[in-house]
Amino acid sequence: MADTDIACEIIEGRLAAEIVLRTPDVIAFLDHRPVFKGHVLVCPTRHVDTMLDLPAELVVPLFDACRRIAAAMTTALGAQGTFVAVNNVVSQSVPHLHVHVVPRSKGDGLRGFFWPRTRYAEGELAAYGQVLRDALA
């Protein structure tokens, strides 16, 4: 795992992010290097290293947020479905539990566990964040 916990920095307001959902237990924000535009990272607001360390009382809030975001992707982004994944230690680039919720459509080119990354054009990050926040409201 990496040493820098950008999730805690975002939670504490020390690092800017396009936040789409925040509750006392969970924060969700757009990945700055998304697999597909609209890719969201969902994290407990309490520091938790991996899924194996997740306290039982945070399981429902975390995965309920993932469920809500996946539903919002179909309405707000026109996604046909989603890919939801968690890396534990291996391939976990941030030492803070985070669930990837990625919008999917048939023929989008995602195959297996190779995750090509893209970038947002100027203004797109905020636009994707707003449309997801609106769908989650």
Image (spheres, helix red, strand yellow):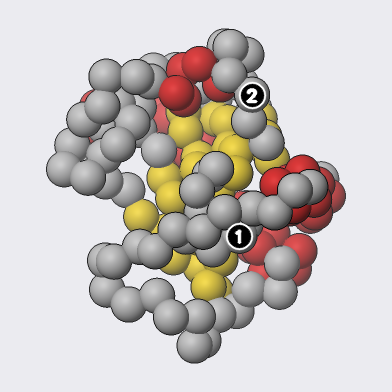
Q: Is residue 74 above or below residue 135?
A: below
Residue sitting at the far front? 122
Q: Is residue 44 above or below residue 69?
A: above
What residue does disc 1 label?
37
* Residue 114 or residue 66, whichever sits in front: 114
Q: Could you tell me which residue is drawn at 58 percent across and 19 percent down?
A: 15
Circle 1: element type: loop
Residue 106 visible in the shown view: yes
- Counting from the top left corner in percent of width and height, residue 96 is at 35, 27
Q: Could you tell me which residue is drawn at 60 percent across and 79 percent down?
A: 80
Position of the C terminus by quadrant: top right
Q: Could you tell me which residue is drawn at 61 percent across and 60 percent down?
A: 37
Circle 2: element type: loop
Mark positioned earlier in the residue sequence (2 or 1): 2
Local packing at callout 2 (Cα closer than 10 Å; few below 14, some 14-19, many 20+) is few
Q: Is residue 58 left or right of residue 13?
A: left
Q: Is residue 19 left or right of residue 133?
A: left
Q: Do the residues labelled 2 and 1 touch (CB within 8 Å)?
A: no
- Counting from the top left corner in percent of width and height, residue 127 is at 80, 50
What residue does disc 2 label?
16
Q: Is residue 34 above or below residue 73?
A: above
Q: Distance between the residues labelled 2 and 1?
A: 18 Å
* Residue 99 or residue 115, whichever sits in front: 115
Q: Is residue 131 above or below residue 49?
A: below
- Three-letter amino acid code at the position of disc 2: Ala
Position of the N terminus by quadrant: top left
* Residue 60 or residue 30, whichever sits in front: 30
Residue sitting at the far left? 90
- Three-letter amino acid code at the position of disc 1: Lys
